[in-house]
Each structure stands twice: as structure tokens, then as C-alpha cells.
Image: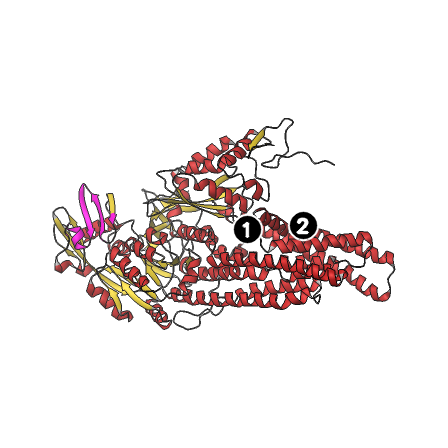
Amino acid sequence: MIAAPRCWHCGEPLPADPPRALVAGVAHPVCCQGCRAVAEWIDELGLADYYRLRRASALRAPDRVDTASTARAVERPELARHFVRTLGDGRSEALVLVEGLRCAACCWLIERTLGRLPGVAEVGMNAQARRARILYDGTVVSLAGIVEAFARIGYRALPLDRAALDDARGRETRDAQKRLAVAGFGAMQAMMYASALWFGAFDGVDVATRDLFRWLTLLAATPVVLYSAAPFFAGARRLLAARRLGMDVPVALAVALIYASSVVEVAAGGPDVWFESVSMFVFFLCVGRYLEMRARHRAGELSDALARLTPAFADRLEADGSLRRVAALELLAGDRVVVADGGAVPADGDLESAQCRVDEALLCGESVPLTRRRGESLYAGSVVVGAPATLRVTRVGADTVVAGIVALTARAMSSRPRLAREGERAAAAFVARVLVLAAAAAIGWAIVDIDRAFAATVAVLVVACPCAFALAAPAAVTRALAVLTGRGVLVVRPDALEDLASVTHLLFDKTGTLTEPSIAQERTVALRHVDRDGALALAAALARGSRHPLARAFAAAAPAALPAVAARESVAGCGVAGAIGGRRYRLGRAGYALGRNDGPADLDDAIVLADDEGAIAAFHVDERIRPGARAAVDALGREGIRVGIASGDAKAKVSSVAASLGIADWAARESPADKLAWVESLRAAGARVAVVADGVNDAPMLAGADVAVAVGSAADAAQAASDIVVTGELGALADARALAREMLSILRQNRRWALGYNLAAVPLAALGFVPPWLAAIGMSASSLFVVLNALRIGRSARTSAGREREPVALDPRLDPAAQA
């Protein structure tokens, strides 16, 4: 039967008189004017190679009315704020679900198309999760314009909601499980029939019975080859279309050769068939791919679970004192919310109750509930324990800490680690050598013994498949990222792990990184017409909205009612300013607050509140060393790392903290430029420098470091410039370095194993000592060894202080398997 003609773009049936799309000078029939417009637009962009690289037809072009409706919807503030995150440098970051994403060619097309839009700085694609991360300048291009650009090339960009989080992974898992089940059942049946043939060879089975079992073996092996092995054929076709070599090429070639030759042998009544070998080969390959997929999924499950934990509804406290149940996406900054005992916090906010206990295990890995006091921050997704709590919302949607973690993880997942890229290049070169060696084996055996040429050639293709070599880096990096995420360390740039292992110097910011500040109420001095509480209220109002630790300290010390602030502005490293009741106020260092280059000597270590008439109040700050800071510094020192402090604070305070922590290298009253200059001087001397900081004024220093580490409460600019974010205690940083070194060690083990296995097995296969079925087992066993060895990363679970700790059990709320 002749197949019905299909649309060249989307594969849908063609109408009687189809329109034609002119692409690369050739007219192709398409099903509708929408597909024609999409195809010709892709050609106009110079991206017609998409049609050569893709492995599946695109979806039908989205309806224009539907696209316009979606574009209008994403511009609505109450929806946009839940998937668009405003960064500190004026740019925005959107995380969207892409409908119609089929393969790597789709990612290639989207990245190049959106990359040509004015104002789009970066596009990161994740084909498995069907997500796109877009970094753009909202003053140049609108989100609606980006959505319409997706539609013009045949895709729909949708806000990423909770229902979409598990959709792509669920489909991929189900598909892999079905292929594995078919391969396992088929391999078992093929081996059973093959055993009858083997035993029959000794018992002198008659020809008719032998042929029956051969046809039954063919029947069992065919679904395995045509269905279970289909991804390997598709991968090989895609690689060859892109003029590249990868491990799918020898796999597909070996499977096709074994199956095709066995079919010919069955039809011709020849002596040898290898259906059981090809079935076992595909089964072991599917097992390896399934384990790899599970490890990859596990690495991203925690961040998705974080997003799921944010509740759908919230109890908003109205002006008359009543509670109103509203959708969490309706909350705005300034709303007051009551969270019941055992309830999840719907948005980031400041606690208004006297105190409460919260479970923040999802954010920092701390399994013990923490006590928060009035003015301190509560984070979306954390759970209130013991008694209800009232908070005032400060951040919603994409601006919450949880959303920031998801965005940082998405950034990491949309980039390829340097180790993985190097492994892929090495595997491609190895495949070329394997193909040459297989051809040489075929020619050699054709001269020596033509009957053994085919088996030897297939054995070389199978046994030398570089699966283990190609899996070495992705398996190790993926496992390391998953372990660190569970310990409260988010790796934004995967290459940072490799760089962290070689760090020689580490510079800490002080306030908010090594110390936690608090306002000393008894040392708060009112200098003019306001009392102490009034001065604290003005200072807290100015600082509200900032993530700087001092802003949180003012919020904790100030009364609950704060005045409104207009025209707020922040000067990195100096302070904040704003208008309250028509009067302009400044809060910060004495020189900044008073409008001078230098402040009075007696206010050198104070935070000053001033207006145009002069100083109003001086606030003195008490600091305590952050939990785990001393243990982290000691552990890093034992590793041979030179630790220093670069701070903008007064000399007396910096020297005191340095002495408490045993740090010899420190600098006080450092401007952002001074801090950056210190980093650059160390790097110029050959040092590998890591920087740990949390403030906006630290962004230049973070950007100049080899490895930039931000603490979880860091300002947006600091997180944007960071490679790693530590959401828990600083001790996790020492854990991260130890784990990075362990990852590199196991990666080297895996590569040595893969290389040694191939050096030992390939000559034996070429000499004819390894039959195809044994080659399949050996190749699959080597890949399985690499994956299982990578799973050893992080098993020791040592803390930065060098003592053993029990692995923290995953909260059932974070475990998708427990929710199923």
C-alpha cells in the first residue's frame, strides 16, 4: 500500500491541492499556510540546515490567534512574575516550557533564532525537560516578542507550571521502561530458542525443527531491533547528518549488520544466526541507558521538588483582620499572610510574629527546624512548625529564593561541562579508529578465513564501542551535581567543580558571609529630633527590599510598622537612599550618608542615617561568627588553601573577625575596585582564586575570580556573577571541594578502566577469540561499571571538620518517587 503524502514541515497529511514552501530554492508541499510561513521564515534566517539535522517532524505551526493570546497573557504582571526573574544588572531571565521540542535540531534552531533577536543575550535549551532559559533586556525586546518568535519557527512557549515539571521526565521514563521491557523479554525468548538450537546441534536435530526455531528466534529479536534499538539508529542518523561521529554510530552499525546477516542466513538456510547476540546486546545497552537516564533525572529532581513545594493557595490577612483564601500567584509585595502550623510558606517575607520555627531542609540541607524571630526572613516552600506565623510578603514568584534556585539549576543544566565536551571529542576520535580497525579486521579475515570475517568484524564493532569512555565524564559530573544539590550547594557552572578542585587561594567577604550582623539597640544613638525607635523605623524602611545582611538586621530590630519609601536607590559599597514623607534620607557609611568623602572619626564603624541637614542617628553593629565558619576555614587550611578576608568594613572589626577565625591575610575598608584588584594580583602571580561573598558590591570581585561562590542569601547581582551558590553552612564549601577532587579521581578511574578494557578486548576480538554475544556482554558490563563507579561519589559523606556524618534522608515532600 502506498503511504499518503505528508507535509514536509510537520508530517501531517496533505490536502488535495497543498501550498508549497520554497526552501533553499526547492518547493516542498506543506499542509497549510502556517507551515509554509514557518518553513520559509526558517529559510530566510539562513537556518535551513534544521531540516537536514532533525530526527522527527515538527508540530503543525501554532495558530496565530492562540499565539497572540499567549503573548498577551505572558505580559500580565501577575503571571509574568512567576516565571520571569529580574536580575540585578537590568536584564531579565525567563524559564519557559517549549511545546513541540523534539530533538537536538530543535534546540539548535531555537538557540540561533532567538539569539538573533535584539536584546536577547543568552538562550539555553534543555531538550529532555523541554525547557528554554532566555536572558534578555526587557527595554529592548518584550516577552511577548520572544513568544511570537517561538511561534514563527513552529514552537509554543508556555509559562512553566507545576503540572509541566514532571511531564517530560515521566514520558521519557515510560518510554525507556517500555523499550527495556521489550528488549528484556525479547532477549529472554531469543536465548531460549537459541539454547534449543545449541543443544540440538549435539543431538542431531532435523532441518525442519532447526529452521522452525530459527524463525521463532527471528520473531523474538525483531521487536528488540526495530523498537528497543530505535533510539540508537536515530542517534546514528542524526550524528551522520551532522557529519560527526559518536558512540551510536558503531552500535547502530553492529546491530544492523548482525540482524541483517542473520535474516539472510535464515532465508538462505545458512549455518549461523546471531539473533540471541543482537537481542542481548540491545538489552544491555538499554540497561545502561536507563541507568544513565535515572542518574540524570535524579540530579534535577530536587530543584523541581523545590518548585512543587510552594503552595498553590495562601491565607491573606485583610485590613479588617479577616483571613481570605487566595491563589498564591495573586500575592503582592506588602501583603500579610498567615501560615498555619505544618503549612508551607507561599512567598518570601519578613516575620511579623514574635518568633516561629521553620523547617528549611529544602533550602540549606539542615534537618533540624530553625528558630526565626520578628523581622527575619522566611522563604517560600519552607514549613512552619509548632505554631502559626504571620509574615509580610517581600518577594513573590520568580523573585523568591526557591525560584532563584530553580533558575540557577536551569542555567547549569543548559550548559555542557568542559569535561563532558572533552569526553565527546575523545569518543568521536575513538569511534573513527574503531571503524578503521573493524574494516582492517574484515579485510584481514577475508584473506585468512572468509567464514570468520563477519563474526570478527562485528565483535570488534561491539566490544570497542566507546560507551564506557563517553559515559565516564557525564556520569561522574551528574552524580557530583546531584550530591552537592542535596547538601545545599548549587553548581551554576558545571566547569566550576573542576576549577574548585585546583583552587589555591580563597577570599571571603566578611559581613553576611563569615558573620551575621545585628543592630546593637543599646548603642543606637539618636543625634537629632527623632527617638531611637523612630530612627530604627526610618532606617529599616530604607533598607527594606535589600538582601544585604545589614538590611535584615535593621528589619529585625525595627518596630513592625514602617513608613513608605519613594525613589529608593542603592550605591554599591556605600548605602541606600530614598524619600520618606517628602524628605530625602541616606543610610550607610558616614561619608556617604553625610555627603562627604570621609566621615567623622567617631562614626567610622557606625551606620549613619542622615538627611540634607546632617546626621539623624548612628547605629552600631554587633556581629557573631556564622555557624560552621571556623570549621570551614580550618578544613580549607588543612587542604593547603590560603584563606583571606576582603571587607569594606572598619579595620577594627575586620581584624577582630580574622583573629577569631585564625585568618592571617585580611584587608579593611576595601572598595569593590580594591577587592577586584586583590583578586587580579593573586591571579597574575599564578594563583587559582575562589571568592565567597554575598553583596552587590562583591559582584566585580566574584566576576574576576576563577571560581565565584555566593551564599544563599546573596543579592541578585552576586548570584548572577557566581559559579556556585551555598545555601547552607559554609562547611558545605569544604565538602564541595573534597567532592570535586573525588569526582576527578573517579573520572580518571573510569577513563583508565575504559581505555584498559578496550586495549585488552579489541585485539582479542580482532583475532577472532571473542564471539559477538560475549562482546555485547563485555561492552555493556564496562558501561555498567562506569555508571556504578560514578555512584560512589559522595558516599563517604565527610563534613568539613573531618568527622563522619549520617547521610540526610530525603524529605518525602522532596522525593517525587514518594509522591507517586
Q: Is residue 642 magenta?
A: no
Q: Residue furthest top?
A: 17
- As drawn, is 694 to the left or to the right of 166? left
- Residue under numbered circle 1: 169
Q: Quadrant of residue 698?
A: bottom left
Looking at the picture, how far across and down is residue 439, in whole percent?
66, 58
Nearer to us in this view, 478 or 264: 264
Above or below residue 333? Residue 625 is: below
Region rendered in magenta: 570-597
Q: Is residue 594 magenta?
A: yes
- Residue under numbered circle 2: 227
Q: Gap in Å between the C-alphas at discs 2 and 1?
A: 20 Å
Q: Amino acid at mark 2?
A: Tyr
Between circles 2 and 1, the one closer to the viewer is: 2
- As drawn, is 690 to the left or to the right of 646? right
Q: Amino acid at mark 1?
A: Arg
